[in-house]
Image (tube, rainbow, N blue to C red):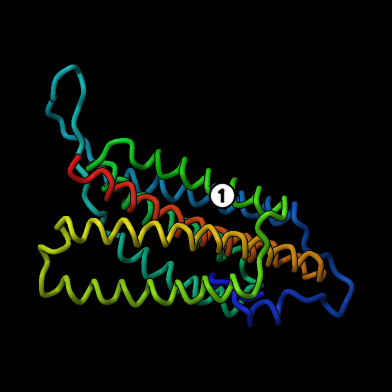
Amino acid sequence: MQTGNPALSEKFASEYLVAPREQVATMTVFGTALKTLVLLVFLIAGGAWGWSSATQSIPNDIGGGYGNTTVTIPGGFWLASFAAFFVAMFLVFNPRRAALLGVVYALLQGYCLGAISAAFNAQTEGIVSAAVLATVSVFVVALFLYMTRIVRPTQKMAFAVSAGLGGLILLYVFISIVSIFNWEWLYSDQFRTIGIVVSVIAIVLAALSLTLDFGTIEAGVEAGAPKYMEWYCGYGLMVTLIWLYITLLRLLALLARNQ
C-alpha cells in the first residue's frame, strides 16, 4: 500500500513489511500502539523543553498579581530542526534503528514544536490547547472510521494523497517566492482566505494519510513483519500526527486573525 507519508513509502513496505526468513518475534497492533505512545511521550517532553526555552518571564507586574512573559525563538531551534531532518532521513534508510533514533527525532522535533507553539500561543492565548484537542479528535475519528471499515485505504486514496501533497509543496514554494517580492501580501485578507482553504485541504489529506498509516500497520502485522517495525511504524504515525497538529495550529491562527 503506497501512502502519502514519506516514512511509510511503497519501497519501505516491499522491503520491510514482510515476514523474516528466520523465526523471530513479529510486530503486533498492541506493540505498535505502545511504541507510538512512548514516542509521543518523548515528543511532549521535547515540546515542554522547547516551550520553556522560548518563553521568558518579565519581572514587571501587569496588574492583578500576574507577571507578563515574552517569547523568542531559542538559539538551538535551527540546530534542532536540521538535526531532526537528518535523523529522519537516516531512519528512512535504516528502520532497524527506529527504537533509538525515533526517540531522538521525537525530542528534537518536540523541541521545535514547543518553541513554535509558544510563539502562536503568545499571539492567541489558548490556541495550542485547541490545536492539540483538534488533533486528538481527528485521530480518534480517523481510527473509528478505519476500524468500522467505513473508510478503507485503497490505491486510489494513496494516489490522491500523494498527488495532493505534491500540489501543496508546489503551492508552498510559490507562496515563498511571491513573499520575497511582496512581503505585505502575507498579511492581507486575500492571503488569509487562501491560507484557510489550503489548510483545510491539508487537514483532509492528513486525515486520509492517517487511514493509510493504519492500513500499513495492519498489513505489516498480517505479513508477520519483524518486531522492530513496531518502532518504525510508530515513528511514521507520529510524523503524520505532527503534520496534522501544525496544520490545525496554522488554520486556527488564520481564523483568529482580525478577531
**154 w.r.t. 75: above or below:** below
Q: Quadrant of the N terminus?
A: bottom right
Residue 19 coordinates in the image, percent (x, y): 82, 75
Compare residues 83 and 168 and report the one nearer the observer: 168
Residue 29 coordinates in the image, percent (x, y): 75, 56
State the residue position of label 1. 139
Q: Is residue 63 left or right of residue 254?
A: left
Tag 1: residue type? Phe
Residue 30 coordinates in the image, percent (x, y): 75, 51
Residue 257 coordinates in the image, percent (x, y): 21, 46
Task: Give residue 216's quadrant in the image.
Answer: bottom right
**177 w.r.t. 232: above or below:** below
- Which residue sits at x=39%, y=47%? 49
Q: Quadrant of the C terminus?
A: top left
Q: Residue furthest top?
A: 64
Q: Is residue 85 left or right of residue 156?
A: left
Compare residues 43 and 141 and report the one nearer the observer: 141
Q: For numbered disc 1, what is the local secondary structure?
A: helix
- Which residue sits at x=41%, y=61%? 201
